[in-house]
Amino acid sequence: MRICRKARPSHPPQPCVQPQDEARSPRNSLHLDVVQAQEKEAGKLKWKSKAGFVGLLSLVGAIRKKRRQRPATTRACVTKTRMWTLEAKDKIASEPVKSGNLGGPEASLTAYSQRPLSELATVKMAYGASLEHVGPNPHAAGEELFDVKVPPLNIPGIGEISPVATCVVRKKPGAVQIEGKKVQVMRGSEDMTQGTQFTMLVEMQWIDTAEKQELIFKGNFKLGLDLPPAVTANLSQDIFENVGNAAMGVSVDTLAKGFVRSFAEDYDRWATEQ
């Protein structure tokens, strides 16, 4: 007897769907393209933002550098075009004293030069110059402050100016030294001090031997003037400095001779009173 088995219905094989195939389906493929496009755009935006930030930093740095350089450039320009300088270098004058052989050591030229510095104010200066004692130098023991007034100087293109220098006076071996770094410059009633640069270094030396008694003046002067445009517009700086230096040299020569002669005469007066 034959037994018949019921045949199972056969089904066509189902294709195996891989994840990547699923992602490539029309619907998922469109989504993936959108995501990739957004990521790409986000990357571009990120780099653009970074580049813009770096550019902004560079711009700010350049502006700050320019601002720092501007004052220095301006000062250099002012110094070059407006600070006009007059100089008198290595000025020397000497004067023998008449009473050098009178009296003993207490009346010698050396003893006179070693007196307290404040007594310099008693010297009667020639040509209207003066030494006015201000007081001790608060920044250095043993030094004294004086206002030194000199005769008016006739400067081409400006006229007469009257400088008054505040000076430090100190004793050095064999000399009295007068150093000035501050000055007030007046032209009539006009104060021309602002922007002025001034240096002065003077030494009053002495020779005190049996054969020779003499006072010697040595000095250097420099005056820088910040002139107004009304003066500089009609005057060449070269001409001003060349002619001005010559005029200042003559004035300082006269001043030096009067200065040393005033001290020699003051010594003679002092020695006869000892």
Image (tube, rainbow, N blue to C red):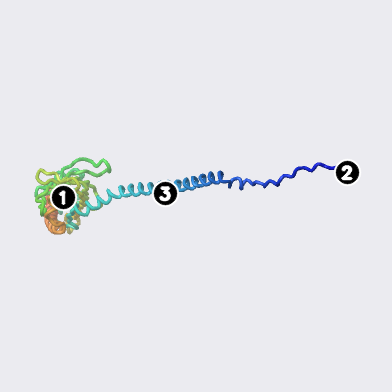
Relative image position of residue 142 (x, y in whole percent): 26, 44
Dot in front, 1 or 2: 2
| Mark 3 vs 2, N-terminal side | 2
Q: Nearer the viewer, residue 55 or 148?
A: 55
Name the amino acid, label 2. Arg
Q: Is residue 86 above or below residue 138?
A: below
Q: Left of 160 or right of it: where is 221?
A: right
- SS class, disc 1: loop
Q: CA distance from mark 3 to mark 2?
A: 88 Å
Q: CA distance from mark 3 to mark 1?
A: 50 Å
Q: Quadrant of residue 250?
A: bottom left
Q: Which mark is residue 51?
A: 3
Q: Disc 1 marks which residue?
A: 227
Q: Nearer the viewer, residue 200 or 2?
A: 2
Residue reaching furthest to the front: 1
Residue 274 visible within the image: no
